[in-house]
Amino acid sequence: MKNVAIHAESISASLSKVPVLQGVSVDIQAGCWTGIVGPNGAGKSTLLKVLAGLLPFTGTVTLLGQNMASMPARQRAQTLAWLGQGEASADDLSVWDVALLGRIPHRPWLAAPSAQDLAAVEQALRATQAWDWRARSLGQLSGGERQRVLLARALAVQAPVLLMDEPLANLDPPHQTDWLLLVRELVARGHTVVSVLHELSIALQADDLLVLAQGRVCHAGACADAATHRAVEQVFDDRITIQRLSQQWVALPKLERGGG
């Protein structure tokens, strides 16, 4: 049986005093890619932020066997990297400096970057194809280019667990494919990846799916399982159908409406 990277038990959370998550319990398998899908307002991003320790909640979250609430901040920052949705960063910072921010958890206060820090930043920028812009400011980049730099910042942490909320925002199809290949490479090296995705056909390439609706997990299972496919179809009111195409599962719009 695979090890559990993140265990969440009886999680409830609210936004602006409005309940969003209600008694959610999940296990995220280590060394796997888990996708989180569901309709708008299902609580996907809220759940991911709770797992990252970014929102107050009731319940418990265990990260690599340790209660996350009791982990020192530096240890947690070294263990779990985060890429948020629509994250802000100073436009006058260079691409290199933005990616270098990912090394803060590994550096003593006010210390100069080490050779290991520099190597990690270069590796991350090359992995996201942002190396050639390293001297440019973030404000000079398009939305898709900016997203790749923020991904590089998360990769530069070199954390064993990586959480990403809508990481494909502003990326064109070729760079979405690059992201997919990068995630598979990370998992092949033993990393754990959890991503909230609206792009269902890409989410179906993950190892496991969490299907959310109305603040609850209505299904958790392998992406290849028929039960998972049915759960995804149902949570989107049977307006989509999941089919096998070119050796992979894809979500297609169901153009006819049911009922009489």
Image (spheres, helix red, strand yellow):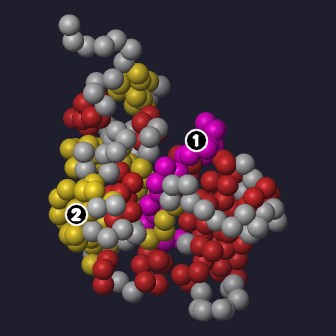
Front residue of 181/241: it is: 241
Q: Nearer the viewer, residue 27 or 93?
A: 93
Residue 31: in sight, yes or no? no
Quadrant including the C terminus: top left
State the extent of the magenta-drawn residues as a range.
Answer: 158-178
Q: Residues within 10 Å of mark 2 (few under 14, many from 20)?
A: many
Q: Quadrant of residue 222?
A: top left
Mark 2 residue type: Ile
In the rendered image of this protein, does residue 146 appear above or below residue 228?
below
Q: Which mark is residue 177?
A: 1
User: How far is the residue under mark 2 from the one under mark 1?
Assistant: 33 Å
In the image, what residue occupies the spot 25% across and 50% down? 215
Which quadrant, please, contains the N terminus?
A: bottom left
* Mark linked to residue 105: none
Give the amino acid type for the residue marked by disc 1 in the picture.
Thr
Check disc 1 and report its element: helix, strand or loop.
helix
- Which residue shows up at 70% across the image and 89% down it? 112
Magenta includes 169?
Answer: yes
Q: Position of residue 25 (x, y in %)?
A: 20, 59
- Confirm or deny contact between disc 2 and disc 1 (CB under 8 A): no
Percent position of residue 74, x then y: 46, 84
Q: Nearer the viewer, mark 2 or mark 1?
A: 2
The label on residue 11 is: 2
The residue at 22%/62% (across/down) is 12
> SS for tag 2?
strand
Query: In the figure, 146 relative to 159: above or below?
Result: above
Taking the image as shown, residue 151 lies to the left or right of residue 226, namely: right
Query: In the displayed structure, does residue 206 sit left or right of residue 70?
Result: right
- Asked whether the viewer can see residue 106, the reply is yes
Q: Residue furthest front?
A: 17
Where in the figure is residue 15, as x and y percent of width and height? 33, 60
